[in-house]
Image (cartoon, helix red, strand yellow):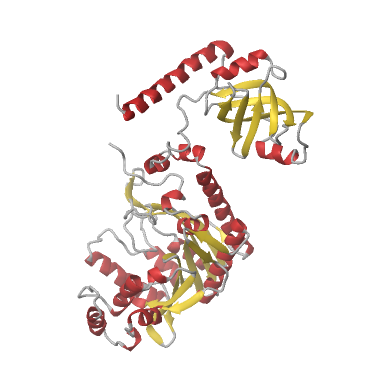
C-alpha cells in the first residue's frame, strides 16, 4: 500500500471510529447535539478576570465554558478547549472529577465541541485551568480537523474550505478579525467626517459607473434582464442631486465578470463616497487621513510590514502628475505632443506596442501602466489623468486634455480613484453618449445609456469630489495578505471535477 492509500485509509478509519463513538454517546447520554446550553464566561473573559491569580492557587469560583477540543494529553487528563476568543486548559483527575465524567472523555475526539463546568485554578506552572466537575457533549464532529502542519499545505483546501483554514490557522483567523476591524474603522472614520451611509441597488436594469463586463440575470416577475452592479457611482450622485446629504458613502459589493488573479476577484468590496462642494484635493486628504487612521488602529503605528517591504501610511502622500511621471521614466514629454498621431509615433519610437487607433490620452495611460505603476511602492497620488479615459471628471484649468483626477498607489497597486466630479449636464450627456458609441463599436451591444441618471443631472448636481477605494486590496496591504483570496472568506474558485 502506497503512502497516499495509507493516508486515505487512515482518514476513512478515523471517520468510522467517530461515527461509532456517536452511536455510543447517543445510547449513553441521549442528545449529542442539544439545543440549549449556556456558558457563563468566554475564555478571553476568564483570562482577563483571573489575570492576577497567583500560581498554584485553587479558587472556589465555579464557571461554565464551551469550545472545540484542540488537544488532549495524558488520556484526557489535560484538554485544550478553544472558543472564538482564545484557549483554556481543562483538567480532569480522579481527585477533582467524577469517574463518569472522566469516562466520557474517552468518547471525545479532537474537533468535538463540549461544555465544561468546574472551578478555576492556576497551576504551579502558571497555566490558567478549570478543574472539570461536569462535561456536556454539544457537538460530535464526524470528520477530524486538518493535521496542523500538513493538512492545510494545500492552498486549494484553504480557499475552498475556509472553515478548516480558520480552525487550524491562527494567522488566517487573525486576518479576518482584522478585516472586520478595518471595515468598521472605515465606517467610523467616514461618520466622524460627517458622511452618511446609504444603500443603493445591487441588481440594476442598466449597469454603469465603470467600464467592466457585468453578470447578467433575468427577473421573472418583471420579465426583464438585469445586471449585478459594477459600481454604485450613478446612484450615489443621484443622492447628491436629491439634497438628502452633502456627504454620502456606501461600503458596497460589486461584481465584474472578468479575470481572476491574486488582486482580482469577480465579487469584491469597495467604498465609494461623494462630498458636495469639495474637489479632488479634498478627497486626497480623506484618503490620507483614512489610511493613517486604519494603520494606527491595527498596528499602533503608521508603518506597516508587507512581505519584505515597510509601507508608511503617514500623510501627506507623494503627489505626481501622470505626464510628469511618464516624462521622468521615459523621457517622453506628452504635454509637448499635440496630436494623437504624434503620440502614437513617439510611443512606438520608444519601443511600446501601441494600437493604431489609440488616442493621445490612451498612449499616455498605457506607458504609465507599463513603466511607472510598479515603481510606486510608498503611498502616492498620481494626478492629472487624460480626459480620454476619464469621462466623469472636470478638466484641469488651462489644460483641456487632462482632468482633475487622481489614483492612489501603494506597493505598485491602484487602491483608490477620485475625481472633481463633472456636474455639467450637457457635457456629461455628450461624454456618456460618446462612451456608449465606443462600447457598441467594441461589440458591447448590451450597454445602454442611463437616461434616468442624466435626467437627475439635468435637475442640478452640486460640484463635488468623488472617491472609490478597493477595500480588499487595502486589507491585503494592512494585514500582509499576499493574495486577495487570503482576505476574502469565500473567494470564487473553479469547480472541481
Q: Where is residue 160 in the image (x, y as percent from the top left)?
A: 39, 40
Relative vertical location of residue 423 with respect to residue 41 in this rendering, above or below:
below
Residue placed most toward the observer, 427 or 9: 9
Q: Is residue 200 visible to the viewer in this orientation of the structure?
A: no
Q: Where is residue 203 in the image (x, y as percent from the top left)?
A: 40, 51
Q: Where is residue 267 in the image (x, y as percent from the top left)?
A: 40, 51
Query: Along the horizontal axis of the image, is 200 left or right of 337?
Result: right
Check the image and name the residue furthest to the top.
Answer: 27
Q: Which residue corresponds to the image point at 47% horizontal and 20% vertical from the top-left?
A: 18
Q: Which residue corresponds to the image point at 47% horizontal and 58% vertical from the top-left?
A: 307
Residue placed most toward the observer, 472 or 168: 168
Name the quadrant of the N terminus: top left
Relative vertical location of residue 167 with respect to residue 232 in this rendering, above or below:
above
Relative vertical location of residue 316 with respect to residue 143 in this rendering, above or below:
below
Name the quadrant of the C terminus: top left
Q: How many labels does the image show?
A: 0
Query: Along the horizontal axis of the image, is 371 left or right of 278?
Result: left
Q: Is residue 120 visible to the viewer in this orientation of the structure?
A: yes
Residue placed most toward the observer, 252 or 107: 107
Residue placed most toward the observer, 372 or 493: 372
Query: Along the horizontal axis of the image, is 332 left or right of 254?
Result: left
Check the image and name the residue furthest to the right.
Answer: 60
Q: Position of residue 29 (x, y in %)?
A: 58, 14
Amino acid at each position: 500500500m502506497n503512502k497516499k492509500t495509507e493516508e486515505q485509509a487512515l482518514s476513512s478509519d478515523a471517520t468510522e471510529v467517530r461515527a461509532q463513538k456517536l452511536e455510543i454517546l447517543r445510547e449513553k447520554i441521549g442528545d449529542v447535539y442539544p439545543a440549549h446550553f449556556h456558558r457563563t464566561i468566554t475564555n478571553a473573559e476568564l483570562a482577563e478576570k483571573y489575570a492576577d491569580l497567583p500560581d498554584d492557587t485553587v479558587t472556589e469560583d465555579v464557571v461554565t465554558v464551551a469550545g472545540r477540543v484542540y488537544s488532549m494529553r495524558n488520556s484526557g487528563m489535560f484538554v485544550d478547549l478553544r472558543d472564538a476568543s482564545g484557549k483554556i486548559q481543562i483538567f480532569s483527575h480522579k481527585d477533582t472529577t467524577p469517574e463518569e465524567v472522566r469516562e466520557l472523555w474517552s468518547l471525545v475526539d479532537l474537533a468535538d465541541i463540549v461544555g465544561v463546568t468546574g472551578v478555576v485554578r492556576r497551576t504551579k506552572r502558571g497555566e490558567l485551568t478549570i478543574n472539570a466537575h461536569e462535561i456536556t457533549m454539544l457537538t460530535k464532529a464526524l470528520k477530524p480537523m486538518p493535521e496542523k502542519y500538513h493538512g492545510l499545505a494545500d492552498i486549494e483546501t484553504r480557499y475552498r474550505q475556509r472553515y478548516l483554514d480558520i480552525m487550524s490557522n491562527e494567522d488566517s483567523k487573525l486576518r479576518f478579525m482584522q478585516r472586520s476591524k478595518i471595515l468598521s474603522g472605515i465606517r467610523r472614520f467616514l461618520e466622524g467626517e460627517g458622511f452618511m451611509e446609504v444603500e443603493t441597488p445591487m441588481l440594476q436594469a442598466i449597469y454603469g459607473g465603470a467600464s467592466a463586463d457585468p453578470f447578467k440575470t433575468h427577473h421573472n416577475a418583471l420579465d426583464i434582464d438585469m445586471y449585478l452592479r459594477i459600481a454604485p457611482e450613478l446612484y450615489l450622485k443621484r443622492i447628491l442631486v436629491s439634497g438628502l446629504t452633502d456627504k454620502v458613502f456606501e461600503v458596497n459589493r460589486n461584481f465584474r465578470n472578468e479575470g481572476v488573479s491574486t488582486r482580482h476577484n469577480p465579487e469584491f468590496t469597495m467604498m465609494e463616497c461623494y462630498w458636495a462642494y469639495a474637489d479632488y484635493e479634498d478627497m486626497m486628504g480623506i484618503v490620507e487621513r483614512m489610511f493613517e487612521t486604519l494603520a494606527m488602529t491595527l498596528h499602533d503605528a503608521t508603518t506597516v510590514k508587507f512581505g519584505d517591504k515597510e509601507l508608511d501610511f503617514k500623510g501627506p502622500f507623494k503627489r505626481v502628475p501622470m505626464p510628469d511621471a511618464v516624462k521622468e521614466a521615459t523621457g517622453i514629454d506628452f504635454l509637448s505632443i499635440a496630436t494623437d498621431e504624434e503620440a502614437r509615433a513617439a510611443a512606438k519610437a520608444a519601443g511600446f506596442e501601441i494600437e493604431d487607433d489609440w488616442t493621445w490620452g490612451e498612449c499616455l495611460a498605457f506607458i504609465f501602466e507599463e513603466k511607472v505603476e510598479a515603481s510606486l511602492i510608498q503611498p502616492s497620488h498620481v494626478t492629472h489623468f487624460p480626459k480620454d479615459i476619464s469621462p466623469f471628471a472636470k478638466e484641469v484649468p488651462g489644460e483641456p486634455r487632462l482632468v482633475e483626477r487622481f489614483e492612489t498607489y501603494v506597493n505598485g497597486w491602484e487602491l483608490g480613484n477620485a475625481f472633481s466630479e463633472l456636474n455639467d449636464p450637457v457635457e456629461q450627456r455628450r461624454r456618456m453618449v460618446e462612451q456608449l458609441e465606443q462600447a457598441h463599436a467594441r461589440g458591447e451591444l448590451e450597454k445602454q445609456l442611463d437616461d434616468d441618471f442624466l435626467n437627475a443631472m439635468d435637475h442640478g448636481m452640486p460640484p463635488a469630489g468623488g472617491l472609490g477605494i478597493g477595500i480588499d486590496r487595502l486589507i491585503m496591504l494592512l494585514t500582509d495578505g499576499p493574495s486577495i483570496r487570503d482576505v476574502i472568506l469565500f473567494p470564487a474558485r473553479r469547480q472541481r471535477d
